[in-house]
Amino acid sequence: MTTVSAPGKLMLMGEHAVVYGYPCIVTAVSERLQVSMEETTDGNITIDAPQVKNTRFVNQAIIDGTNTWNILHKGLRIKTQSNFSNCYGFGSSSAVTVATLFALAQVFRNNVTQKQLFDTAYKTVLSIQGVGSGFDVAAATYGKTLLYIKGGSTLDELPWNLNTNGVSLVVGYSGVKADTTIIVKEVAKKREEQLERVDRIFEAIGKLVVQAKEAGDKNDWETVGKLMNFNQEYLRDLGVSTEKLDAMILGAMKAGAYGAKLSGAGGGDCVIALVSKGKKETVEQAITQSGGTIVSVQTGTEGVMVTE
Ligand code: MEV
């Protein structure tokens, strides 16, 4: 058996606008999804995936990988395993897709580039979800913290380290599972109805992302925090924040976070708060008191890799 693992992701800034061509900042997290694969001789593809939703992505990844890379096999046995719940919105679908394709490449080819892997995995995810910028596929493939533009036209690794330098990222789960595809489609509908207004919001979010990149590159986390707060206001204007998310964000800000916002599509999933090391515990307590559950994650982790 060959075993590989790919990381989950957290969107730091730029969600929704990234679907329309603006940059976002995404980081790979310590939560990882493993795929083990071996060739068999019985002509069957056997998938043992505890999270049923993942089976569709594994199946489609096998179809796309074998077609794109001209792989002929006599049967496959595949097993997936993850150390994170698919509730948090950490991107288990993109991680399982990237890991399956990478495992396929390891077992049958060994010479796939990161860009070839990204392109094939993005195609797989798009064919199932129908919408998406591919930022989650980029995090699973390349890891680290990236400035990302849709389709991988920009994939710049940022020198950010949110685990040291006196700064920390606190993640709080709202307890509500968000459906990204539905929310992305709702935003698209809103854009059809109010084109100028929504496009102005996307453009403004894009500018915040560029400013945050510059500030973060200089370890100016106070400024990054302020920019996150502005980003959150625009997300609220888009209608994707919720009372629960707003309460957790308010709690984090009152407890002294540099900045806090929802992460991902909105409607639920997680909030993130950027804090100085000294404020970490107070902010965690405030988020818990506002009804959130703290999820302890490291950021900027490695992309897909062989583990066994
Ligand atoms: C969802 O986590 C982030 C969105 O920007 C969708 C996407 O980029 O695919 C809303």
Image (tube, rainbow, N blue to C red):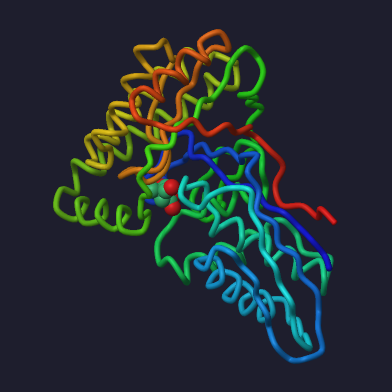
Please, which residue is most extreme toward the bottom here? 43
The quarter of the picture where residue 117 lies is: bottom right
Counting from the top left corner in percent of width and height, residue 202 is at 32, 40
Counting from the top left corner in percent of width and height, residue 10 is at 52, 40
Q: Residue sitting at 46 percent across and 54 percent down?
A: 133
Nearer to the camera, 167 or 292: 292
The correct choice, above or below, for 16 with respect to 223 in the image is below
Q: Quadrant of the N terminus?
A: bottom right
The correct choice, above or below, for 275 with respect to 293 in the image is above
Please indicate whether residue 123 sits to the left or right of residue 5 in the image.
left
Nearer to the camera, 43 or 281: 281
Q: Quadrant of the C terminus?
A: bottom right
Please indicate whether residue 83 sits to the left or right of residue 261 in the image.
right
Please, which residue is most extreme toward the left here? 193
Nearer to the camera, 40 or 161: 40
Disc tally is: 0
Q: Residue sitting at 68 percent across and 57 percent down?
A: 115
Counting from the top left corner in percent of width and height, residue 241 is at 28, 37
* Residue 21 seen in this snapshot: no
Q: Residue sitting at 66 percent across and 58 percent down?
A: 81
Please indicate whether residue 78 sits to the left or right of residue 230 in the image.
right
Counting from the top left corner in percent of width and height, residue 80 is at 66, 63
* Residue 217 seen in this snapshot: yes
Nearer to the camera, 64 or 240: 240
The correct choice, above or below, for 291 with respect to 184 in the image is above
